[in-house]
Amino acid sequence: MERFADASVRLAGLAGAVLGWGPEVFWRATPAELGAVVAVLRGGGDSVAPPDAATIARMQEAFPDE
């Protein structure tokens, strides 16, 4: 059985090499965030359509830049 420390070091190295994440980014990421990124890279993530112009306009109105 693989130890957590060994697996995490390997995964941190992979995140650094493939995603460009430094240790501080890797250790702040949640397992769900890391899993989502890996799923997208593997081509199996749920795809979400980008917002349309009307949605963006509503968001800009609701959350204006100050």
Image (cartoon, rainbow, N blue to C red):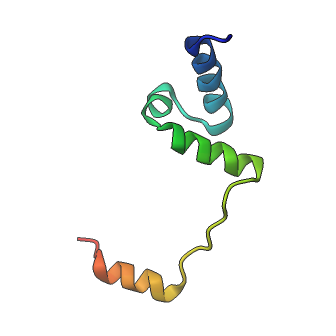
Front residue of this view, candidates 24 and 8: 8
Residue 47 in the image: state x and y as whole percent. 66, 64
Q: Picture quarter containing residue 3?
A: top right
Position of 1 relative to 37 (above/below): above
The C terminus lies in which quarter of the figure?
A: bottom left
Residue 30 in the image: state x and y as whole percent. 47, 38
Q: Residue at x 53, y 77 (%)?
A: 51
Residue 14 in the image: state x and y as whole percent. 67, 28
Front residue of this view, candidates 3 and 21: 3
Position of 18 relative to 46 (above/below): above
Position of 46 relative to 21 (above/below): below
Q: Residue at x 55, y 34 (%)?
A: 21
Q: Is residue 44 left or right of residue 2?
A: right
Q: How many marks do you count on the picture?
A: 0
**Residue at the right extreme, as displayed:** 43
**Residue at the bottom extreme, as displayed:** 54
Residue 61 in the image: state x and y as whole percent. 31, 83
The N terminus lies in which quarter of the figure?
A: top right
